[in-house]
Image: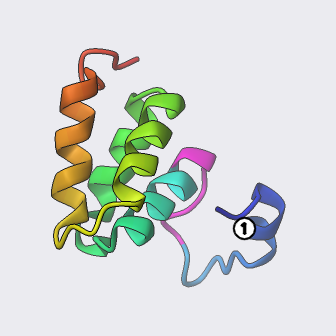
Amino acid sequence: MDSIKNILKSFNPTEDKYISREFQAFGVHLAETLGDMRHKSLYIKLARDIPRPVLEEALRFVADAQAKKKGALFMWKLKEMGGFAGKR
């Protein structure tokens, strides 16, 4: 994942309007890593509501998997870890 400094350097306000906060950048990173850009807004919402260590642990679990649907596996792992119960 890029640092905030690198994200802000490459930020184009006319094209990248969806990234204005750090959690949004992490949500986009989740979507890209999972290969699920179609559900980008869902991952941004998860990055806003669920503590970062929980999301990172689920992402590490999925990153090594050879699953066809990494997004579905990520959501399953979040549910198994109790990530939805720990919303802010």
User: What colour scheme does the image use?
Assistant: rainbow
In the rendered image, which quarter contains the N terminus? bottom right
Q: Is residue 7 above or below residue 20?
A: below
Q: Is residue 64 above or below residue 55?
A: below
Which secondary structure, mark 1? Answer: helix
Task: Tell which of 39 and 30 is nearer to you.
Answer: 30
Kind of residue sitting beneath label 1: Ile
Name the residue rendered at 79%, 69% in the picture: 6
Magenta highlight on residue 18: yes
Name the residue rendered at 70%, 64% in the picture: 2
Q: Quadrant of residue 65 in the image? A: bottom left
Name the residue rendered at 46%, 63% in the picture: 28
Q: Is residue 42 above or below residue 36?
A: above
Q: Quadrant of residue 72 in the image? A: bottom left
Residue 76 placement, left or right of 12: left
Name the residue rendered at 50%, 62% in the picture: 29
At which x and y percent is residue 50? 40, 29
For mark 1, what is the residue?
A: 7
